[in-house]
Each structure stands twice: as structure tokens, then as C-alpha cells.
Amino acid sequence: MLRFFFHYCSPFPLFLEMASVVGLAGFFRTRGSATTWTALEMSGPLALVVTYLVLRFFGSVRWYRRLPHQRGGTRPLGIENHFRRINVLGSYSLAMATALLWGGLPPVLLWGLAIVQGFFVYVSGVLLYFHLTDDSALRVNVFSHRAPTLSHTPRSMPGARPQRAAQVT
């Protein structure tokens, strides 16, 4: 059941995200034009929408070149995996913002959610910076798999697997 609600390939987070975007647009269309908001009141929802759009942009870009055996696969690699998982958190925070606005919460209080999403944008930006400045020729996720053939891993590295001795018969 948790996989249905929180997995990045599940249709529920995408549905929740679409419903939240429609709900926010409906809120700003009906109540946003009827009231006169100050710049401070409008800044909370605006900051939330901006951080959401930045995270959505990061999640929509292919950051790795696909290898021939990965053409049909949908499993994301490396930071693409991170960005898809962050989009699930973004869809839930957008849903909370929509529910709070329709519930009558003052819009300036959405700064709390915007700060949380701003933290996600900051972490994603740091990971993206490391990805763009990395010039290593190793394949993606080379150290995260438990493959026994990591022959290019130096023995002096922490966590390196010991080499098996050749069997003599």
C-alpha cells in the first residue's frame, strides 16, 4: 500500500500533483481575483510555485546518456532517480498547500512549505553541480550495485571487496 502512495512510478503521486495544480489554479482564479492581496501574502504561494517548477524542471531533464541496453528501460539512474523521488515529495507538499489555501489558511503561511521545498532545491542543485563537474569515466551507480566484478575498484578504498584467490587443483 505504501508503494501505491509514495513510489515514483505509481500513478497516485502524479494524479495528486495534477489535482493540486488544478486546485491551485482554481483557487487563484476564484479567490485570488476577489481579494486584494498584499505582496507579502502573495509571496508565500509564489515561492512555493517557483520551487515546485524548479524541481519539476530538474525531474524532466535526462541527465545521463542512455546506453543501448537501457533504451527501453524506465528505471532512472543516479541523480535522475533522486529528482523523480523529490517530485513525489513536491506533489505532496503542493497538495498540502492546495488543501490549506482552500481551507482558509492565510497564504503567507505557505512560506513553511516553500522553505522545505527550497531545501530540496538546494540539495538538488548541489547534486547537479557535482554531476556537472564530475569528469570520471565510471558508469553511473558503479559503487551502489553489489556486483562481484568491480575489478576497477582499488583495494585501498573503504568498502572495497577483497579479491578471491584463484583455486589451484
Image (tube, helix red, strand yellow):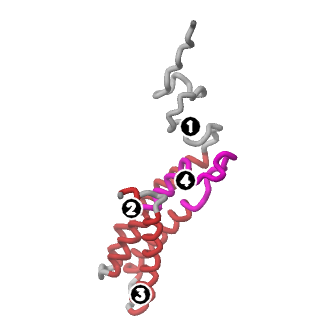
The reply, left or right, for residue 167 in relation to residue 92 is right
From the top left corner, tell me how far across and down residue 6 is, in percent: 40, 59
Q: Residue visible at 36% across and 57% down?
A: 2
User: Closer to the N terminus: mark 4 or mark 2?
Assistant: 2
Name the mark nearer the viewer: 3 or 4. 4
User: Closer to the N terminus: mark 2 or mark 1?
Assistant: 2
Mark 2 highlights which residue? 5
In which image quadrant can residue 7 be found?
bottom left
Amino acid residing under circle 4: Glu
The quarter in which the C terminus is drawn is top right
Mark 4 highlights which residue? 80
Magenta segment: does it hold 67? yes
Mark 1 highlights which residue? 142
Q: Magenta part of the protein: which range? A: 59-88
From the top left corner, tell me how far across and down residue 3 is, in percent: 40, 56
Q: Residues within 10 Å of mark 2 (few under 14, many from 20)?
A: some
Name the mark nearer the viewer: 4 or 2. 2
Q: Residues within 10 Å of mark 1 (few under 14, many from 20)?
A: few
User: Closer to the N terminus: mark 1 or mark 4?
Assistant: 4
Residue 75 in sight here: yes
In which image quadrant can residue 166 be found?
top right
Residue 121 in sight here: no
Mark 3 highlights which residue? 32
Please, what secondary structure does the residue beneath circle 4 have?
A: helix
